[in-house]
Image: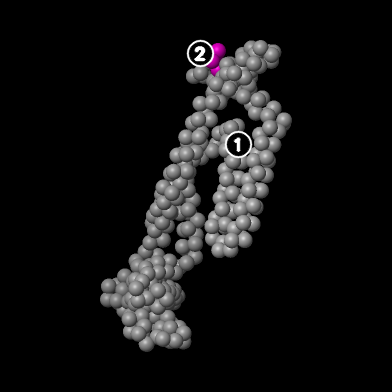
């Protein structure tokens, strides 16, 4: 059973190595070398790899998303405008990209008119959303409620070390409830507005930083993912399959590539690379590893 799995992984690595080398050679034949190493390494006990992928992705995402989760866990009332604006800008850029790749002048004129129409509709729709009475009332209500919470917190500084939370928690703790009179509402609204302006600026800065750092976050996630995956699945048998399978594919390529002028000859070259890789893997495992080096108890 173990020998069969090693032979299958080596065959896959050798076949892919020779196939990529034939397709991209002779200038980029070395990409077949990398492809064969990767597939030979991963093809051995692929069920274990599939399980490890989920675990590695979860661990990598957990490490990357620590700060991002803290930021997204808070509600930001002023992000709706940015969100809708971003959606329409992305839609507009999409049509501009289509327009750029169209060779026909007539198609460009049609797409230009369509782009203008979509932009106008998007702007009108955006203003309708912003000026919607329900949304406007909700935003105003949220602002003065935030001001009310801040005002109560300011007047109860002595309990900051004992009371966790804001707003309605004070009422539950027995503090006197301020009446919702017009003077209080107006005062709370201005308190909330003065809090909202710098907070909106902070969110804009964070969004800009996030856009700039997005490639770095993706790179960090991928690096952590492959590192965790490597730690979960690495074994001597995988190294054996990667090396022997790729070696078979490279030998087949250099011996048969010059005479592989037809499609049938190229298919034969690929199959020969897989068979040679499987042969080298089995010989390495059965003779060298198990009988000569006596590593039959290699952990997988």
Q: Is residue 62 left or right of residue 107?
A: left
Foreground of the two, 294 or 71: 71
- Picture quarter with the C terminus: bottom left
Residue under the point 61% across and 36% down: 80
Q: Residues within 10 Å of mark 2 (few under 14, many from 20)?
A: few
Total numbered badges shown on the rendered structure: 2
Residue under the point 64% across and 16% down: 186
Is residue 42 in view from this perspective?
yes
Residue under label 2? 158
State the mark number for residue 81: 1
Residue 63: image quadrant is top left
Residue 17: image quadrant is bottom left
Q: Which residues are magenta?
A: 153-157
Foreground of the two, 76 or 229: 76
Percent of width and height locating residue 296: 34, 71
Percent of width and height locating residue 78: 58, 32
Q: Secondary structure at mark 1?
A: helix
Percent of width and height locating residue 153: 55, 17
Q: Is residue 96 left or right of residue 289?
A: right
Predominant SS along the magenta part: helix
Residue under the point 66% across and 48% down: 117
- Picture quarter with the N terminus: bottom left
Magenta stretch contains residue 134: no
The answer to whether marks 1 and 2 mark residues whose Cβ atoms lie closer than 8 Å is no
Question: How far is the residue under mark 1 from the one under mark 2?
Answer: 37 Å
The residue mark sitting in front, 1 or 2, is 1
Residue under the point 56% across and 50% down: 93
């Amino acid at each position: 059973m173990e020998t069969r799995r090693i032979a299958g992984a080596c065959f896959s690595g050798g076949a892919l190595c020779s196939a990529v080398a034939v397709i991209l050679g002779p200038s980029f034949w070395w990409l077949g070398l990398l492809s064969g190493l990767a597939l030979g390494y991963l093809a051995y006990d692929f069920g274990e790899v599939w399980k490890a992928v989920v675990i590695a992705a979860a661990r990598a995402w957990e490490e990357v998303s620590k700060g991002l989760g803290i930021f997204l866990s808070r509600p930001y009332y002023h992000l709706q405008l940015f969100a809708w604006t971003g959606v329409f800008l992305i839609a507009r850029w999409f049509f501009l990209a289509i327009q750029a790749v169209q060779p026909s002048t007539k198609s460009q004129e049609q797409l230009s008119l369509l782009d203008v129409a979509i932009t106008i509709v998007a702007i009108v729709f955006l203003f309708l959303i912003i000026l919607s009475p329900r949304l406007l009332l909700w935003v105003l209500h949220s602002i003065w409620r935030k001001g009310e919470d801040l005002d109560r917190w300011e007047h109860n500084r002595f309990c900051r070390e004992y009371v966790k939370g804001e707003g309605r928690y004070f009422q539950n703790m027995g503090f006197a409830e301020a009446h919702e009179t017009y003077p209080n509402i107006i005062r709370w609204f201005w308190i909330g507005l003065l809090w909202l302006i710098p907070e909106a600026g902070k969110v804009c800065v964070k969004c800009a930083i996030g856009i700039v750092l997005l490639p770095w976050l993706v790179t960090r996630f991928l690096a952590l993912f492959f590192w965790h995956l490597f730690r979960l699945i690495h074994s001597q048998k995988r190294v054996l399959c990667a090396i022997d399978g790729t070696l078979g594919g490279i030998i087949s390529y250099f011996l048969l590539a010059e005479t592989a002028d037809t499609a049938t000859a190229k298919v034969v070259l690929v199959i020969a690379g897989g068979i040679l890789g499987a042969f080298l893997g089995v010989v390495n495992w059965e003779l060298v590893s198990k009988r000569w080096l006596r590593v039959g108890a290699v952990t997988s």
